[in-house]
Amino acid sequence: MGKTAPLIPSSYRTIADTIARGGRLKAQCDTCGESRELDRLALERIRHAKGADYCLIGRRSPCRFTRGCAGWVRFFYWNAFWWPLWRDRDDTRWLLASK
């Protein structure tokens, strides 16, 4: 067995694919540690706001879980356990953008 995460399944390529295939997503803050699983209503809100082809792979957003938290929320997908919905190159891009 390899030591790296598997390739991200195609059911998570777009928000529409995730909804259609019943994919499970979780959002977690890298600073306060709060996390929430995104239910179907939350996924539908994202699709309505961003469009059906919106992709959460490699995305992050400011934390709104905890008042005053300056952290970033990143996304995870379920495949027997929670896997990160980003790749190493996304981390590099985020680090360079923060300087």
Image (spheres, helix red, strand yellow):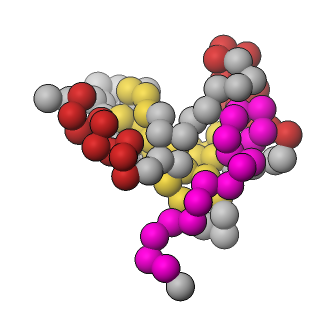
Picture residue at 53% right of the left edge, 85% below the top? 1
Picture residue at 64% right of the left edge, 26% below the top? 54
> Where, by quadrant of the figure, is residue 74 drawn?
top left
> Where, by quadrant of the figure, is residue 18 drawn?
top right
Q: Position of residue 33 (x, y in %)?
A: 37, 48
Residue 92 located left or right of residue 9: left
> Which residues are drawn in magenta?
2-18
Residue 57 located left or right of residue 69: right
Q: Nearer the viewer, residue 72 or 95?
A: 95
Q: Nearer the viewer, residue 33 or 76?
A: 76
Q: Position of residue 98 (x, y in %)?
A: 20, 29
Report the number of discs. Answer: 0
> Can you see residue 82?
no
Q: Residue furthest left?
A: 99
Compared to 81, does 77 lie above or below?
Answer: above
Q: Residue furthest right?
A: 20
Compared to 50, does 24 lie above or below?
Answer: below
